[in-house]
Amino acid sequence: MKIIIKKDYDAMGKEAAKYFAEVIRNKPNAVLGLATGSTPISTYKELIRLHEEESLDFSQVITFNLDEYLGLTDDHDQSYRYFMDINLFNHVNIKKGNTNVLSGVTDNPETECREFEEKIKTAGGINIQLLGVGGNGHIAFNEPGSPENSRTRVVDLTKETIKDNSRFFEKVENVPTQALSMGMGTILEAKKIVIIVNKESKAKAVAASIEGPATTDVPASVLQKHSDVIWVIDKGAASLLKDSS
């Protein structure tokens, strides 16, 4: 496990994007695992810059997103498909057919999740996975208690996660209560994992994930068992680490 502490949010984004660019340049048809939310935006901005100014080529890249709200259409302004389009896909030369985001309006969520897993397998597995961490230590929508071997599935969101995500909606009642999410087991199979976390409000989750025991009570702590994990965090998120030098 490697821990990199950057001075601010933009510096974090540049650092995280560096690892994705390296993978793409070494393997033009790389399979990327992507995340949504406010934290990855600076990473995506840097990847767009690298595409526009340094010819980073996405033409053969395949992507899989971690999750999607159940009940939201692709064009809903809070759907994760919409987020990815406006924050990355529309600005690089990726083929939309190579971008895989779970459907929030599928008639059969279980089949949707099973086929998503099969697509990852057919693509050869995820080469590099981007993650964020929730205030309770969740990764994707794997809430505390999610089994370590879980696969892509329908999950119920906790009150804390619904409250955290309500800032993106007009009111808390509009936040979906369920989502489709990659499982812990699926995430752990990625060859490399980059976790980006900022703000002091996440410091407790970061400390528990890095320095606490590996337990499903803090889902991100299970990543201690992975062989290639890079934490990219700011000083606020690192503030409770025993060794934050």
Image (cartoon, rainbow, N blue to C red):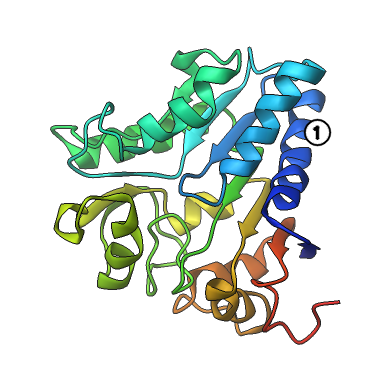
Eyeballing the image, is 99 above or below 222? above
| Figure quadrant of residue 210 | bottom right
Eyeballing the image, is 23 above or below 162? above
Please indicate, yes or no, whether residue 125 appears anywhere in the rendered image.
no
User: Which amino acid does the dot numbered 1 rest on?
Assistant: Glu
| Figure quadrant of residue 56 | top right
Q: Is residue 5 left or right of residue 101?
A: right
Q: Position of residue 12 (x, y in %)?
A: 72, 52
Mark 1 element type: helix
For the N terminus, give its image quadrant.
Answer: bottom right
Q: Residues within 10 Å of mark 1 (few under 14, many from 20)?
A: few
Residue at left 29%, top 67%? Answer: 163
Residue at left 56%, top 81%? Answer: 204
Question: What residue did someone put label 1 on?
Answer: 22
Residue at left 70%, top 48%? Answer: 10
Residue at left 60%, top 84%? Answer: 213
| Figure quadrant of residue 47 | top right
Please indicate, yes or no, whether residue 81 appears anywhere in the rendered image.
yes
Q: Position of residue 153 (x, y in %)?
A: 30, 50
